[in-house]
Image (tube, grey):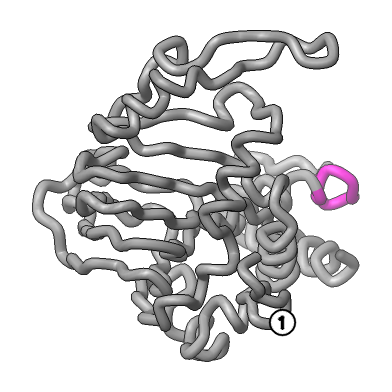
């Protein structure tokens, strides 16, 4: 890892956020607002050096949809740059080097998903974040060489930390359109170039887009799948099915006082379940 020891790598939540404190992030930004944390150019360099990425691509058998090329908002047909062969009796995709290189030269973005399963420093970082947030964490890598964007304006179903490992990228964030929450907005509300060593936090549901700047760029997308209100309601429903209150009829003929009493019983049962877990 270029002589970088594990002690020097940002392998936990505190080191990832530095110089911002975890307390400031959790109080002011987590699930509330984006934040951009500038860092020294070499802050994330040791997490995934270029030679380590090359080694992963050479040695690992990648699953379908784990490795893809994206260009101008569309996925490039894998048949344009891969072919199928066999390895130890298994049918596996193999990269056609010339065609693959041409795609990258013409502006395609390389996306490698679940890289934390293949690279120990990123495994350690993902596990650290899972302990902090008590939620599933995953890490993808995005690599681009030209000035063609990969994904169009979109929003994610999870919180994400963008750690710029090498190069730089232009990011734009957008506010939702009132009354049209599912329609991508046209005007951005924030724009900045994220340089090597910078960290960008984007909470779930915030529209965003990124554009490479005609130079090699490598960033990590670190997802945190925090539970939603819908997840909470589903969990409560599951817990209530195993207790007496959950089996009580909610009659349409009940009086307001009876409904209020039943609601209080439900709250107490739910609280009891949460303290036991």
Residue placed most toward the observer, 249 or 200: 200
Which residue position is annotated with label 1? 7
SS state under label 1: helix
The quadrant holding residue 147 is top left
Residue placed most toward the observer, 133 or 107: 107
Q: Is residue 220 above or below residue 134?
A: above
Relative to 30, is 13 on the left or the right?
right
Quadrant holding the N terminus = bottom right
Q: Residue furthest left?
A: 187
Image: magenta residue range: 239-246
Q: Is residue 99 above or below residue 38?
A: above
Q: Residue at x 49, y 83 (%)?
A: 25
The location of residue 266, given as percent across then percent down, is 74, 59
Quadrant holding the C terminus = bottom right
Q: Is residue 30 above or below residue 218?
A: below
Q: Residue at x 70, y 34 (%)?
A: 60
Q: Residue at x 40, y 13 (%)?
A: 80
Relative to 156, is 92 on the left or the right?
right
Residue placed most toward the observer, 45 or 240: 45
The location of residue 110, given as percent across then percent down, is 42, 37
Residue 201 lies within the magenta run: no
């Amino acid at each position: 890892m270029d002589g970088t020891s594990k002690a020097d790598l940002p392998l936990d939540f505190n080191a990832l956020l530095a110089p911002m404190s975890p307390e400031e992030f959790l109080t002011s930004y987590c699930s509330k607002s984006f934040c951009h944390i500038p860092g020294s150019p070499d802050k994330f360099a040791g997490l995934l050096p270029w030679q380590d990425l090359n080694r992963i691509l050479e040695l690992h058998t990648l699953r379908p949809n784990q490795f893809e090329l994206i260009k101008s908002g569309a996925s490039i047909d894998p048949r344009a740059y891969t072919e199928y062969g066999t390895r130890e009796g298994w049918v596996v995709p193999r990269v056609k080097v010339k065609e693959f290189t041409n795609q990258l030269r013409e502006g395609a973005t390389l996306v490698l998903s679940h890289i934390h399963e293949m690279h120990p420093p990123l495994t350690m970082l993902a596990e650290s974040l899972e302990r902090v947030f008590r939620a599933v964490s995953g890490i993808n890598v995005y690599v681009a060489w030209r000035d063609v964007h990969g994904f169009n304006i979109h929003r994610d179903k999870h919180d994400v930390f963008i750690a710029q490992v090498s190069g730089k990228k232009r990011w734009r964030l957008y506010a939702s359109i009132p009354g049209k929450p599912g329609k991508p907005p046209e005007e951005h509300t924030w724009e900045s170039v994220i340089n090597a060593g910078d960290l960008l936090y984007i909470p779930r549901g915030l529209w965003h887009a990124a554009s490479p700047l005609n130079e090699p760029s490598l960033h990590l997308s670190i997802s945190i799948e925090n539970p939603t209100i819908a997840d909470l309601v589903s969990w409560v429903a599951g817990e209530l099915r195993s207790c007496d209150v959950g089996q009580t009829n909610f009659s349409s003929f009940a009086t307001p006082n009876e409904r209020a009493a039943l609601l209080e019983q439900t709250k107490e049962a739910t609280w009891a379940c949460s303290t036991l877990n």
